[in-house]
Amino acid sequence: MIEQGRGRPGGIRSKNRPDCKLVTPLVVWVANGTATDAERAMVVLHTLTCPHCRRELAETLALRRTFQRWVERLPDLPQRAWHGFVDLLEEREEARAGHRAAVEVAEPEAVEIGSVLRPLLAWLAAESPSPAWRMVDWALAYSETQGR
Amino acid sequence: MNGDDAQLIARVGKRDLAAMRVLYEKYAPQLYRFAVARLGDERSAEDVVQETMLAVWQSASRFRGHSTATTWLFGICRRKVAEVYRRGQGREVPGLLHARSESTPPGPGLEFWESFSRLSDEHQEILLLVFYYGFSQEEAAEVLGVPVGTVKSRIHYARHRLREALRDAGAEEGDRKRRRSERSTGT
Ligand SMILES: [Zn+2]
């Protein structure tokens, strides 16, 4: 269809017309109704004198009609679909809530290490007041200066 | 974008199930056709629609209206279809067309399906968006996440591929008929 007039001496070699290059890409948008008024006017005017683009437009319109008829024959979404969606929504929200709860159990609030260490060190120091435990006193004092 | 849709999505973002139902009833049937045409399987298509609408429910509060509701929804839907293909569950059998051939009105059917299903995913998508849903260049670009220039060239090639495939299918059908008639006259 692109080589309209091919092999016919004197046939219309419409591909050679410079404005075909502008019109051909617009044909599909004219066919689907989204071209601007100016674009549509340009295509329509051009097709009055260009058999190549006229045929291109006719074929595109026919293809679109066939396409629409085919898609319209495809099945419709089942009536029950909304209820299926609500069930799925509840299922997923429950799963998400369950996941959140599981995360909270698995990851308890971070425990400040000093709150465990300080009483332990104090207890050790009190129980064993030997020189070795001076280190512990020192560690305890240091941890307090760090606020931990 | 359509003000009604913007309001609906805003309400969905606040967990308004009634608004979700309005949005669902408006868009789910359209998305379903798209998914069936792409996947050829009613069950998978329904799953895709449900997952799309679930994504809408979960992300509506983040929707800023940079695109229209339609292009946003179709954009999600096509990604869900792509996920089905990645999992290797797409277009096993075009069974639904066989199943419906008894009850559906006459029109393009299995041969059209076969021609369409020979096209690449990109060509199938753009043909559906442009020829069936009537998206503009800009809308199609938004759905597909590509520049408008890509849309223009893609629809050009897709149209030609579909025509070729239909011509081939017609030729094959012609051959089959000819062979059948040769056999019947030969016996
Ligand atoms: Zn022309």
Image: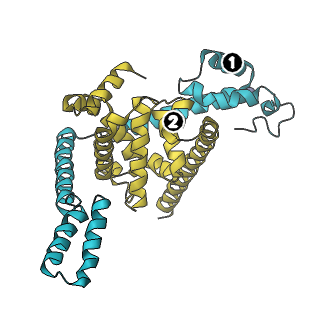
Chain colours: A cyan, B yellow
Q: Up-down: is A138 above or below B100?
A: below
x and y percent of residue A141 in the render?
27, 66
x and y percent of residue A66 in the render?
48, 36
x and y percent of residue B113 in the render?
44, 48
- The chain containing the residue under callout 1 comes to A
- The chain containing the residue under callout 2 comes to B
Density class for disc 2 (Cα within 10 Å; few <14, some 14-19, many ≥20) is: many
Pick whichever, B184 or B92, lies toward us: B92
Pick whichever, A141 or B115, lies toward us: A141
Q: Amino acid at mark 1?
A: Met
Q: Image quadrant for the N terminus of chain A?
A: top right
Q: Image quadrant for the C terminus of chain A?
A: bottom left
Q: Is residue B157 visible?
A: yes
Pick whichever, A96 or B42, lies toward us: A96
Density class for disc 1 (Cα within 10 Å; few <14, some 14-19, many ≥20) is: some
Q: Up-down: is B166 above or below A132?
A: above
Q: Are marks 1 and 2 in contact (CB under 8 Å)?
A: no
Q: Which mark is residue A42?
A: 1
- The picture quadrant where one finds residue B104 is top left
Q: Assign ligand 1 to one image quadrant.
A: top right
Which mark is nearer the camera, 1 or 2? 2
Q: Which residue is tagged 2?
A: B142
Q: Amino acid at mark 2?
A: Glu
> Could you tell me which residue is drawn at 18 percent across and 59 percent down?
A102
> Could you tell me which residue is drawn at 46 percent across and 30 percent down?
B66
Q: Up-down: is A20 above or below B117?
A: above
Q: How many marks?
A: 2
x and y percent of residue A115 in the render?
20, 63
Q: Up-down: is A99 above or below B63?
A: below
> Element type at marker 2?
helix
Pick whichever, A48 or A135, lies toward us: A135
